[in-house]
Image (cartoon, rainbow, N blue to C red):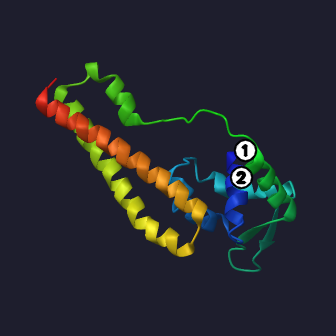
Amino acid sequence: MNATSYVVLGMLTYGPATSYQLKQRVAGTIGNFWAFAHSQLYDEPARLVAAGLVNQSVEQGGRRKRTYSITDDGRKALADWLAEPTLEQTEVRDTGLLKLFFGTQAAPEDIRQLARDRYESHRARADGYDLQRAEIEARADRWQLKTLELGLRYERTVERFWKDFLDELDRDPP
């Protein structure tokens, strides 16, 4: 079992879904903080069916669409995973931060543009999280709201970092 396995199992706890519907659920929720190739959402359900953790029903006629639902064994596997300790260090993979690290090799105007782009990107994502909040509050999903809260705090903190850096560049150009 890998992280994608648990993503599929977790998403199926919200109800049966096709691979396309799983992709849509992920895009509007955990896709904000858990990046992976969405093509895995087309392969992983079949693996979970073979393992007995997911059931599959196939539409008769038409495109023979496959709809997946979680089994009792799938719920148990998800619960066992949720109970496991989570001690690994958080991984940050930020291309903007990587470019800044090598900034001595860049032109000053490229560094300024990097800072501006990253500031605007993080501000836009945080603003988007603000808009999502009402939708999640309406569903009264406390745990999704907590993940959104951390995402919002993260984005506002990083937004502030890039804004401060832009101000620093204005005061003390490279």
- Secondary structure, mark 2, is helix
Q: Judge by depth and name the residue closer to the eye, 78 or 20.
A: 78
Q: Where is residue 148 shown, x and y percent of the image?
A: 49, 57
- Secondary structure, mark 1, is loop
Which residue in the rendered view is the most extreme toward the top?
A: 104
Q: Where is residue 149 shown, x and y percent of the image?
A: 48, 55
User: Label 1 amino acid?
Assistant: Asn
The relative height of residue 173 versus residue 82 in the rendered view (above or below) is above
The relative height of residue 33 versus residue 45 in the rendered view (above or below) is above
**Quadrant holding the C terminus:** top left
Q: Where is residue 147 shown, x and y percent of the image?
A: 54, 55
Q: Is residue 37 visible?
A: yes
Identify the residue position indicated by label 1 in the image: 2
The relative height of residue 133 versus residue 81 in the rendered view (above or below) is below
Residue displayed at 35% across by 24% down: 101
Q: Is residue 47 visible?
A: no
Quarter assignment of residue 107: top left
Please state if 110 lies on the left or on the right of 123 as rendered. left
Identify the residue position indicated by label 2 in the image: 6
The relative height of residue 27 versus residue 66 in the rendered view (above or below) is above
